Image (cartoon, grey):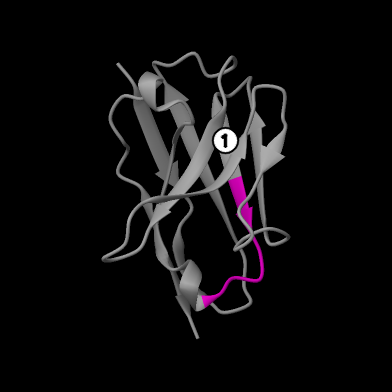
Amino acid sequence: QVQLVESGGGLVQAGGSLRLSCAASGISFTNNAMGWFRQAPGKQRQLVASITSRGYTTYPDSVKGRFTISRDNAKNTVYLQMNSLKSEDTAVYYCNLILASLRGSWGQGTQVTVSS
């Protein structure tokens, strides 16, 4: 059974930083690309960072240079370091497999709120 547990969110002022963690179980974590996604109220869920099994990372322009994704395969955990946060980064953040065909259910997510 797939289980994804996100943590590390909170309330932060604009310009601040947060580090999110996602502990995964029930999946072939080491062999698969993982991603961080976010969903703001009234908007679709979007991918904000991805990391392959070998550590290759990609980011959309909206977060490039501010967010850093990393993974610890020994701990089945993926991280998202978020710096220079902006109000538009406010959302619920989720982690999951990049390949949609391999995904199970989503976790509960972790709320990030950036105050301006």
Left/right placement of residue 77 relative to residue 91 reads right
Q: Amino acid at mark 1?
A: Val
Left/right placement of residue 50 relative to residue 41 reads right
State the quadrant of the N terminus.
top left
Give above or below for 110 relative to 116: above
Magenta-tinted stretch? 80-86
Give above or below for 36 relative to 1: below
Count neighbours of disc 1 (C-alpha within 10 A) and say few if under 14, some if 14 to 19, many if 20 or more: many
The quadrant in which residue 4 appears is: top left
Q: Label 1: which residue?
A: 78
Going 30% across and 44% down the picture, which residue do you hit? 108
x, y (%) of residue 96? 43, 34
> Quick one: SS at disc 1?
strand
Q: How many marks?
A: 1
Give above or below for 45 relative to 34: below
x, y (%) of residue 91? 39, 62
Give above or below for 87 relative to 116: above
Going 55% across and 20% down the picture, which residue do you hit? 32
x, y (%) of residue 89? 49, 67
Going 35% across and 47% down the picture, which residue do you hit? 109
The stretch drawn in magenta includes residue 82: yes
**Residue found at the very far bottom of the displayed protein:** 116
Left/right placement of residue 79 relative to residue 89 reads right
x, y (%) of residue 114? 48, 74
The stretch drawn in magenta includes residue 22: no
Going 39% across and 16% down the picture, which residue do you hit? 26
Q: Tell which of 35 and 44 is nearer to you.
A: 44
